[in-house]
Image (tube, rainbow, N blue to C red):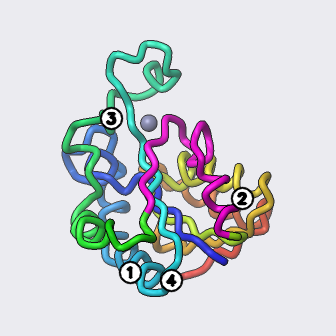
Amino acid sequence: MKALINIDYTYDFVADDGKLTAGKPAQALEQKIVEVTKEFTDNGDFVVFAIDGHDATDQYHPEMKLFPPHNLIGTPGRALYGSLNDFYQANKDKGNAYWIDKRHYSAFSGTDLDIRLRERNITELTLVGVCTDICVLHTAVDAYNLGYKINVPENCVASFNQIGHDWALSHFKGSLGANVFEA
Ligand code: ZN
């Protein structure tokens, strides 16, 4: 069984005026991410939305020192971006979408994602979203360590850092044994 993990494709990470935006390279993914999400949904596969959720008053969070406040819980910046949000709103109650508030880069860190996947006998994950070299990377490394087979459609991931993006794609392929392909 397989699942799609949609990572941080939110207003703050994608829109021109998002709080921590990857900008144009991220905006360019919109149609393809929706297409892949629709494909998994139509197939009845498990579709996870693993979305950063921060609290501006959380002085203990390590990201406080690293990045400006972003994806704050309860703010519009945390909504999925563009037509992915439209798709999510229209399909979230159909039974196979699962929203995770994550606190760290990895969708596995401090969440019940691994348990939810194992309950469904899922062994293969497709990762889409942003940023290739941060949240997608950390999720991929955890998935690898937990024994999942990993797929990364390269036209469904992006970063504000092109060198980091390219490096991460080669790391997925060369060190995590991931299938990196054009969706
Ligand atoms: Zn964050």
Q: Which mark is residue 38?
A: 1
Residue 110 appears in view: yes
* Residue linked to disc 3: 70
Residue 183, numbered label: 4
Query: Which image quarter holds the N terminus?
Result: bottom right
> Upstream in the sequence, badge 4 or badge 3?
3
Looking at mark 3, is its residue's CB closer than 8 Å to ligand 1? yes
Q: CA distance from mark 2 to mark 3?
A: 27 Å
Toward which corner of the image does residue 169 lie, by quadrant? bottom right
- Residue density around tag 1, few if under 14, some if 14–19, many if 20 or more, within 10 Å: some
Q: Position of residue 103 (x, y in %)?
A: 49, 35
- The amino acid type found where label 4 is placed reads Ala
In-image side of 178 versus 130 (left or right): right
Q: Which residue is mark 2?
A: 171
Residue under the point 27% across and 38% down: 19
User: Percent x, y for residue 127?
Assistant: 56, 65
Determine if the magenta segment contains residue 83.
Answer: no
